[in-house]
Image (tube, rainbow, N blue to C red):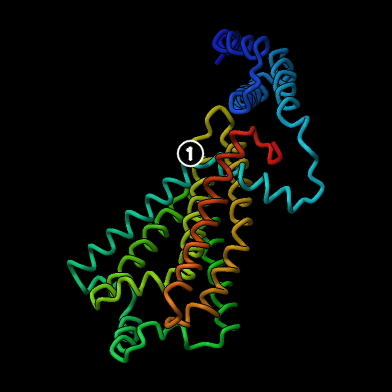
Amino acid sequence: MREALFIKKNKDRWTQIEQQQSSDPDEMATEFIQLVDDLSYAKTFYPTSRTTRYLNVAASRIYLGIYGNRKAETNPLAKFVRYKLPMTITRHRWVLLFSLALFSGFFILGVLSARSDESFIREMLGNAYVNQTEDNIAAGNPFAVYQGENQVVMWLYILINNIRVSIIMLAGGVLFGFVPLFQLINEGLRLGAFEYLFAQKGLAGDFFLTVFIHGTLEISALIISGAAGMIIGTGFLFPGTLSRMESFKRNARDACIMVSGLIPVFITAAFFEGFVTRYAGMPVWGKLIILIGSLSFIIGYFVIYPIRLARKGGRPNA
């Protein structure tokens, strides 16, 4: 696009932002994002023009309006937890929602497929695992598979494996996001088949109350990791007003932030699976406390808090 046409297309909006700057945090954040997009485009195609300098000044003015009065965060970890990770999640909320919908859809498909064809369970889980589980159910200890290893060894093994899967999904994003896409599909189908393996024995409720002691955090982290990988792919495929390489680098940075923020979730999920899930006979109220607590954390920190933070213009103390 020629510079004159670029100016003509956006001049009225720039003038309105400059002369009637909003005091509403949501509107200020939207105006800032629009100006930054315009500035990135101008830097790419008109790096030495007056338009670029004008947009840089205008964006800086709004940035100071949003962040100038925010209390400085001296602790980098606190800044990451309170601001950087939640705002990264907000920027990519639609990819996260798609990841959740994709996994949920194929989980349901896995249940329906197992219901219509029981051989599907063995295809997804393997004969050895299915036979072992069926033997455990027949012996009156359906979840004995979680009781076979030393707690610490099991915790570390599960933690390393979950982080490995997350990194594979993240790195697989460079292949246009197809690797995490297919992994989410596969894991959704596997979980659906796993659930029906217990449901057909009349143990659907026990399955959710026991497996989701650790599964609530583990599956949530898996969905977010899959979204992170797809974010890398969308950065390359849909660059918007940025150059394709710049969009790819920005999205790759955001994806790494999201996966880094999941490490405590992986640690806790592995701890639950190694130390807590093995006690399948614990009272229902104990299981519900862990389930509700885990779900409340996921919804509170990864959904509600980012939305509230964005409405405040990215100011945790606002």
Instruction: Tell me the residue at 62%/62% (across/down).
Output: 263
Q: Position of residue 34 (x, y in %)?
A: 59, 24
Vertical position of residue 212 compared to residue 68: above or below: below
Density class for disc 1 (Cα within 10 Å; few <14, some 14-19, many ≥20) is some
Res. 288 visible in picture: yes
Residue at (68%, 24%) from the top-left corner? Answer: 43
Residue 282 occupies quadrant: bottom left
Kindly indicate the quadrant of the structure image that contains residue 196: bottom left
Q: Which residue is mark 1?
A: 237
Q: Say whether residue 291 is left or right of residue 257.
A: left
| Residue 226: x %, y % from top left | 48, 54
Residue at image coords 73%, 25%: 65
Residue at image coords 49%, 35%:
238
Left-right relation of 257 to 292: right
List the single residue furthest toward the left. Answer: 116
Q: Is residue 46 left or right of residue 13?
A: right
The N terminus, quarter of image: top right
Residue 141, percent from left and from top: 36, 87
- Give the camera-side residue of 229 and 153: 153
The local secondary structure at tag 1 comes to helix
* Identity of the residue furthest to the bottom in this view: 139
**Kind of residue indicated by mark 1:** Leu
| Residue 122 visible | no
For residue 316, above or below residue 290: above
- Check the picture and name the quadrant holding the C terminus: top right
In the image, residue 74 sits, relative to residue 5, either above or below, namely below
Q: Is residue 213 left or right of residue 155?
A: left
State the residue in front, 110 or 290: 290
